[in-house]
Amino acid sequence: KERGAGSLIAGTVATTALVFGFFEILPHFPVGVSEVHLILGSTLFLLFGAAPAAFGLALGLLIQGLLIAPFDLPQYGMNVTTLLVPLFALQYVARRTVAPQTPYVNLKYRQAFTLSLTFQAGIVSWVTFWAVYGQGLTVETLSSVATFGAAYMLVVILEPLADLAVLAAAKAGQRFRDGAWLEPRLFSPA
C-alpha cells in the first residue's frame, strides 16, 4: 500500500526466487517430524518487508512443491501457515524491538537474534502443533518434535549472523538505497 504495486511485485519475484533457492540449494535434512531448512525468513523480512516476504514464502514453497516435491502439495496449507504465522509474529516483534528511528542496516546482534529467534521459535511451534494434531499427543511424537526443535537451534545460531552479514552488505551497497523492490526501512527510519 505504501510502496505501490510495482514494488510489491518486484519484491515478491525476488523473494520467491530466493525462497525456492533456499529450499533447494541450501543444506536441509530430515530430523524428527520434519526437515530443518535455513529459510532466512528474518533476512527476507528485513530486506523486502512483510508483504513481499509473505508472498515469496508462499509462492516459493508452492513452486518447490509443483516442480520438485509434489508429494508435499497435500500438506501445502500446513507448510505455508508454518512459515507465514512466524513471519507475522516477527513483524509484530520488529515493531517493538527496533526503535522507529533505526534503519534495519543499523541493527545490533541482539536485535537480529531476537527477530530470528521469533521466526524460528514460531516455526518450531507450528511444526509441534501440526505434529501433535496429526499424530496425537504421544511420547513418540513429543520425542520426535524435541529432536526437531533441538536441531533447529543450529538455525537460530546461523540466521542472525546471516542477517547481519546481509545488512552489512546492504549498508556498504548504498547505491541500492533507492531500489523500489527493497523495504524502505532498510535504509531509512520508520
Image (tube, rainbow, N blue to C red):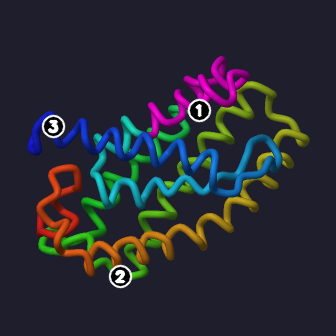
At 32% from the left and 52% from the top, the residue drawn is 91
At 25% from the left and 59% from the top, the residue drawn is 95
Q: Is residue 69 magenta?
A: yes
| Mark 3 touches mark 2? (CB < 8 Å) | no
Q: Is residue 179 magenta?
A: no
Q: Mark 2 points at which residue?
A: 108
Query: Could you tell me which quadrant the C terminus lies in?
Result: bottom left
Q: Residues within 10 Å of mark 3 (few under 14, many from 20)?
A: few
Q: Comparing marks 3 and 2, which lies closer to the viewer?
A: 3
Q: Distance of mark 3 from mark 1, alpha carbons? A: 24 Å
Q: In this view, does 31 lie above or below 112?
A: above
Q: Name the residue under label 3.
A: 6
Q: Where is residue 149 in the image (x, y as percent from the top left)?
A: 72, 56
Q: Which badge, 3 or 2, comes first in the chain's sequence?
A: 3
Q: Mark 1 points at which residue?
A: 64
Q: Position of residue 88 (x, y in %)?
A: 37, 44
Q: Which badge, 3 or 1, comes first in the chain's sequence?
A: 3
Q: For the magenta stretch, what is the residue range?
A: 57-78
Q: Which badge, 1 or 2, comes first in the chain's sequence?
A: 1
> For the residue marked with disc 3, what is the amino acid?
Gly
